[in-house]
Image: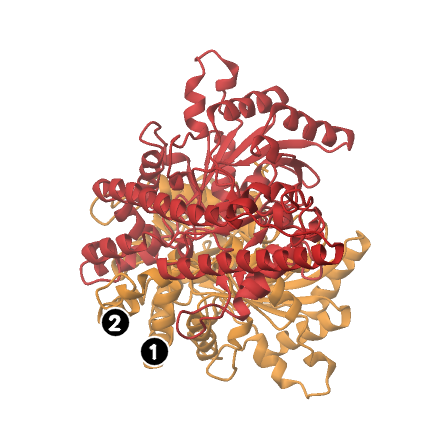
Chain colours: A orange, B red
């Protein structure tokens, strides 16, 4: 593997990171640098966690209050994990789901972040050459996590903007059919709920469609719920566990042995450095196997100990979960409304740390190449690292994922101003181009007073050939 | 994989752990329980680390002195790791090797313990079906770490007690030859230096034999040096890096691109809970690939931060390394000399957290079954969890690995008394059996005054059929 390129780090998703890495924005040291909007991080509530840490020195084995536990904990390597840790994580997973579901601590299996959790699922459930179906657009690193070392394949379930990228029965059947025709054994469906990059949580109907589908085919359903705690707007989050409760006891769809969840504290709590991943399976054989595999990516016992304390403090976690939602909602509202003012729409969403931004009207051509050209402009001229839809295997060009929860208010303001200025420049260039065109063709030019409004209204009329030339001149020629 | 048994957890090595788990010794709560001598843990110096932690609150992001760094560190997820961490680990690796070698921080790749490091090596260097050659006896969990998910094979390099289990040119060639005849592609040799379970560090000559061999075959050499810091007796530890320096600049054997090291802080520092594994390769492509793979088992940033502080405190690490050696040496000397007094010899060793105990004279029969029968007696009657040689793929029955650094002095004393009492009972039973035999056959019985001496001298004469019946009666019949 050291000599091949299966990792997928050469996609534009990672290229954007490299552009950021070589010239990172800093408010005083490098104010012209690239602002990182390509990283789905949640830093909005770390101050609350930091405050809790300060007030709870017993939670650490490195404080005077906790150091007497150092020897025991440093030496603890049972792959079941500290019982208190598993209990606290199970409790927290329930809380994030509104307390409507109980999770069994004995089914909590540790992994090296969600990255490790996804790979463990693939190793447990599929053999090399087998496939999982994954709705598009999907998280680019699934290609690394699920495929790279396991040798399994990911086959797209094609979702479209025309119905808000929903997963339909037809799309599921079609993906399955294609696999069968290619003689590929499908072992499961992997969905992210809420979706990364869409920022939308799955509704009950879609989840039930999935459950029926995988039961009909006798394949597995893996729900990546690592953004469960980021659902900041109604409808509230509905996890797969809750759906299973909906079925009457005798309904075969209630069978849980095909259902598995991956979870993590990286996104919901903004603790990616701690590498806390979880595999939660309703299948005993999978729990057993996953636990054995967890030896390759156990959570540091130092970190287990701290989180066991923190997540078992119910008063704190209740407040924290609420506050995370409140701040995410506020930031999302602020960001999307400012974008709307300059004519940029995002897919309507209720979760996640990002927006799925629609820039189709700015494409020169409706191709992946057109999308990447615009993306390079955004990276190099606007100096924002956003991620192009093609890197998420999106089937339609012109969509971009923009992360909004990994920066402070000041940086967000600068990012927004850059976007506003970019749109303004783009429009001015369009006006110039039109003027030239009109002068050349002897037509009189008349512009509406509020150019912005026009631009918004006519955005869908823009030529697929160039962001600078509208498709029709009807609004310009009086 | 969830439905097959490739993990290998059903070997007797792990069975012993289960016996311990179901009835663990405790000095007051369960004084008749099983004492754990099957776990290569190093708890002898944790008091020193704990003391350092107490005196250095700035090293933790959870103390008043360090909490201001909490946000940055909790959010840090670069797979290169904290630069300070990599530097401190590189420095420490050099110190453990007597400061004779410099390690490059940019070649330090993190992994989920040595478990993850070994697997990364296998994934990087071999394809499914390829093989690594491994000298026997070897660490049982190599089967899990190197084979289970990668699909590679391990082929034994047969080492024998007749030359103290040394790795010879002949044994290497023979293992390679067998692979070739079976049409298996050999991609490398994996050696543990110091060896687990032997407790012996490789000498310069053996290391050079290995370097010549892998260069001649153009295959890789992976040195698992996770016990480097446990060499408690002369000759001092010589790592593979030091050997490479020995060759003249123009010597092709000096080529480093085939050389890789795995390391960990679990054994040398007794911190297995912290899950700090390291892949150190001299091959750039391997470093790159391994780093990408490290995403599946990064070290918690909380733990990186703490260790960066601790391992960069040179005054402390110098003292710590010395004291670890001193205490291990003392414990080893105490343990082996007490064993010797009751006629039990161990392979002469200078490293590790265990002895390779020779119980061949106690076997009823010289087979794996005979070994396991004795082992079950030790587990169930003597109530010590030791590990039978067959679980280490040893080619000769009768050897057992006994760990001595994972318990306090009091528990060690109890363990030794149990062994002493076991040997006494065994001898008494032997005497009875002999008496009976003599009475039956009408011979007069005469025992030497110092029965212990005799048992020691005649151990090699014991019948392979039973520990109770000596092979000859010459010493008994006057």
- Vertically, is A463 above or below A91? above
Residue A56, labelled with which disc?
A: 2
Cα–Cα gap, marks 1 and 2: 10 Å
Question: What's the residue at 38%, 32% (across, down)?
Answer: B234
Query: Relative to B225, does residue B213 appear above or below in the rendering?
Result: above
List the single residue furthest toward the top.
B250
Few, some or many C-alpha atoms within 10 Å of disc 2 (few <14, some 14-19, many ≥20)?
A: some
Q: Chain of mark 2?
A: A
Task: State which tag comes first along the sequence, 1 or 2.
Answer: 2
Q: Chain of mark 1?
A: A
Q: Is residue A434 visible?
A: no
Which residue is nearer to you in this view: A186 or B170? B170
Q: Which quadrant does the C terminus of chain A fall into?
A: bottom left
Marks 1,2: beta carbons within 8 A: yes
The secondary element bearing badge 2 is classed as loop
Given residues B119 and B74, the one toward you in this image is B119
* Residue B66, position as x, y percentages in the image: 21, 58
Which image quadrant for residue A87? bottom left
Q: Residue B119 location, x and y as percent? A: 56, 45
Q: Nearer the viewer, residue A203 or A225?
A: A225
Judge whether residue B188 can be spotted in this image: yes
- Residue B96 vertical placement versus A399 (above, below): above
Tell me residue A180's x, y (percent).
80, 57
Residue that mark 1 sits on:
A313
Vertical placement of residue A243 versus A280, above or below: below
């Amino acid at each position: 593997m050291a000599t091949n390129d299966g990792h997928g780090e050469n996609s534009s998703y990672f290229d954007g990171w490299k552009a950021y890495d070589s010239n990172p924005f800093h408010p005083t040291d490098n104010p012209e640098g690239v602002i990182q909007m390509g990283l789905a991080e949640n830093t909005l509530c770390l101050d609350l966690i930091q405050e809790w840490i300060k007030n709870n020195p017993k939670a650490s084995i490195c404080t005077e209050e906790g150091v007497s536990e150092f020897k025991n904990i440093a030496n603890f390597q049972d792959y079941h994990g500290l019982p208190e840790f598993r209990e606290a994580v199970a409790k927290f997973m329930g809380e994030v789901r509104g307390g409507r579901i109980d999770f069994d601590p004995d089914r909590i299996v540790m992994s090296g972040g969600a990255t490790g959790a996804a790979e463990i699922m693939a190793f447990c459930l599929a053999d090399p050459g087998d496939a999982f179906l994954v709705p598009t657009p999907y998280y680019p690193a699934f290609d690394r996590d699920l495929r790279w070392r396991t040798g399994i394949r990911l086959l797209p379930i094609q979702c479209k903007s025309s119905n808000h990228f929903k997963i339909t029965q037809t799309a599921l059947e079609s993906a399955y059919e294609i696999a069968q025709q290619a003689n590929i054994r499908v072992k499961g469906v992997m969905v992210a709920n809420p979706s990364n990059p869409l920022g939308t949580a799955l509704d009950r109907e879609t989840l039930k469609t999935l459950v029926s589908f995988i039961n009909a085919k006798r394949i597995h359903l893996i729900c990546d719920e690592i953004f469960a705690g980021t659902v900041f707007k109604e409808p509230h989050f509905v996890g797969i566990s809750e759906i299973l409760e909906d079925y009457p006891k005798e309904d075969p769809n209630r069978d849980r042995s095909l259902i598995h969840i991956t979870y993590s504290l990286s996104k919901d709590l903004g603790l990616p450095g701690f590498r806390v991943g979880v595999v939660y399976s309703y299948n005993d054989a999978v729990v057993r196997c996953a636990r054995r595999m967890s030896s390759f990516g156990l959570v540091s016992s130092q970190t287990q100990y701290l989180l066991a304390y923190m997540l078992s403090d119910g008063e704190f976690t209740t407040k924290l979960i609420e506050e995370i939602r409140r701040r995410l909602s506020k930031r999302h509202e602020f960001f999307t409304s400012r974008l709307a003012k300059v004519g940029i729409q995002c897919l309507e969403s209720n979760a996640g740390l990002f927006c799925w931004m629609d820039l189709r009207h700015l494409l020169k051509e409706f191709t992946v190449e057109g999308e990447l050209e615009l993306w390079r402009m955004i990276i190099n001229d606007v100096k924002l690292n956003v991620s192009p839809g093609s890197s998420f295997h999106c089937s339609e060009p012109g969509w971009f994922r923009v992360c909004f929860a990994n920066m402070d208010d000041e940086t967000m303001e600068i990012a927004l101003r850059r976007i506003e200025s970019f749109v303004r420049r783009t429009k001015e260039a369009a006006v110039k181009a039109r003027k030239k065109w009109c002068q050349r063709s002897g037509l009189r030019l008349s512009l509406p007073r509020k150019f912005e409004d026009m631009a918004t209204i006519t955005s869908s009329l823009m030529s697929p050939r160039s962001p600078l030339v509208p498709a029709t001149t009807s609004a310009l020629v009086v």
